Image: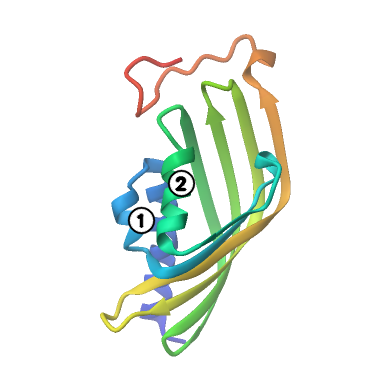
Amino acid sequence: MDLAALEEIKRLKYRYLRCVDTKNWDELAGALTADAVADYGTPAYGKPLSFNGRDAILGFLRDTLGPDIITTHFASQPEIDIDGDRASGTWAFQDMVIATTHRMVVAGAAFYEDTYLRGEDGQWRIARTGYQRTYEAMHSLDDLPSFRLTANRWTPTPT
């Protein structure tokens, strides 16, 4: 097993998740191949979410994860297989989305299934990513009268 490549792939996935949560779209672009594919299996949108190409993935994320959407994504327990300049990985995954304007919280879990490619520059990038939910739950913040958001990185005054 190529332990250096294994660690690079782990760091790549962690960077992908951090960039989504911090809305760092420029850095996220560098984690994806130009022809990357994403299939996000969340029922919250009422339809499958599939995107072909880095620009389509980034466009969706930019358009839907504005300052009133707070996300946290955690992936662990990676199972990664490396074959030369290609690798595949399965990750246990949990996330939470707080939609402040809609006063909703979505929480769930899944297993990410990824494909990684090492480019000519020696850098690993995500070529395919996606998941199907093991569960997803939604609730209204109005059902929690004591809920108070005391910080939001993207808005000056919490809502």
Number of disc labels: 2
Vertically, is 30 above or below 81? Answer: above
Looking at the image, is mark 2 or mark 1 earlier in the sequence?
1
Q: Residue at x 55, y 35 (%)?
A: 97
Which residue is at a point 38% across and 69% down the rendered structure image? Answer: 34
Contact, CB < 8 Å: mark 2 with mark 1? Answer: yes
Q: What's under tag 2, amino acid-wise? A: Leu
For residue 154, the mark is none
Spot occupied by residue 26 in the image (x, y as percentages of width and height): 29, 52
Question: Residue 12, relative to residue 103: is it above or below?
Answer: below
Which image quarter: residue 45?
top right
x and y percentages locating residue 139 in the rendered image: 69, 26
* Crowd rating for badge 2 (residues with CA inside 10 Å; few <14, some 14–19, many 20+): some
What's the residue at 52%, 66% (across, down)? 37
Q: Which residue does the numbered mark 1 point to in the structure image?
A: 28
User: In this rendering, would 66 be left or right of 134?
Assistant: left
Seen from the viewer's position, the closer of residues 26 and 144 is 26
- Residue 67: x, y in percent? 40, 30
Position of 152 with respect to 83 (left or right) is left
Q: Quadrant of residue 43?
A: top right
Q: Is residue 127 left or right of residue 132?
A: left
| Residue identified by numbered label 2 | 61
Category of crowding for the residue at label 1, using alpha-carbon neighbours closer than 10 angstroms: few (below 14), some (14–19), many (at least 20): some
Give the percent coordinates (x, y) of residue 156.
32, 18
At 33% across and 46% down in the image, what residue appears?
24
Instruction: Please name the amino acid that badge 1 sits on.
Output: Leu
Label 2 secondary element: helix
**What is the C-alpha distance between the residues marked 2 and 1?**
10 Å
Vertical arrangement, residue 47 with respect to residue 89, above or below: above
Is residue 144 shown above or below 136?
above
